[in-house]
């Protein structure tokens, strides 16, 4: 990843490409909780234009299951981080 497109995680620079270094040095805590995700299994989905990485939490919080999905979209031949969503 040479740059990251981060929408909704950095409000002052929304929809701008950002370097990976800036995201990982200044904003990683908004995207990743190491206490929750370290050593946790994940699934991934990849096509020629997208990558999705999903962490699933089955009934970890009451009776509800939830998921965190990290999204990477191909832009000019490189997969760039395009965002993170939680479900539900």
Image: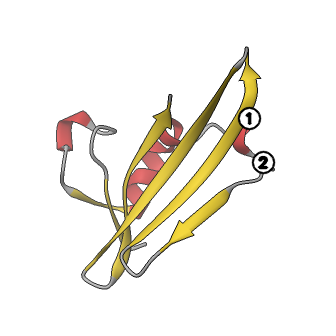
Q: Residue at x 35, y 80 (%)?
A: 78
Locate the N terminus by quadrant.
bottom left
The residue lying at 29 percent from left, 39 percent from top is: 10
State the image quarter where residue 3 is shown.
bottom left
Q: Residue 18's x, y, as percent? A: 28, 59
Among all residues in the image, which is located at the extreme bottom?
Answer: 77
| 2 or 1: mark nearer the eye | 2
Q: Nearer the viewer, residue 45 or 16?
A: 45
Q: Nearer the viewer, residue 32 or 44?
A: 44
Location of residue 1 with respect to 27 vertically, above or below: below
The residue indicated by pointer 2 is 40
Closer to us: 69 or 19 = 69
User: Which residue, as the protein is rendered here, is positioned at the far front?
Assistant: 63
According to the image, what is the colour scheme of the structure?
secondary structure
Are discs 2 and 1 less than 8 Å apart at CB?
no
**Percent coordinates x, y for residue 63 in the rendering:** 72, 17
Residue at disc 2, secondary structure: loop
Label 2 or label 1, whichever comes before in sequence order: 1
Q: Residue 66 appears at what percent x and percent y?
A: 61, 31
**CA distance separating discs 2 and 1:** 10 Å
| x and y percentages locating residue 2 in the rendered image | 37, 73
Residue annotated with mark 1 = 35
The answer to whether 16 is drawn above or below residue 64 in the figure is below
For the point 56% across and 41% down, the residue is: 68
């Amino acid at each position: 990843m040479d740059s990251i497109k981060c929408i909704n995680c950095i409000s002052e620079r929304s929809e701008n490409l950002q370097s990976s270094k800036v995201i990982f040095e200044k904003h990683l805590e908004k995207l990743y909780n190491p206490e929750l995700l370290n050593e946790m299994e994940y699934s991934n989905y990849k096509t020629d234009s997208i990558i999705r990485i999903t962490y699933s939490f089955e009934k970890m919080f009451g009776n509800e299951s939830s998921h965190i999905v990290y999204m990477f979209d191909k832009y000019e031949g490189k997969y760039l981080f395009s965002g993170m969503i939680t479900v539900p």
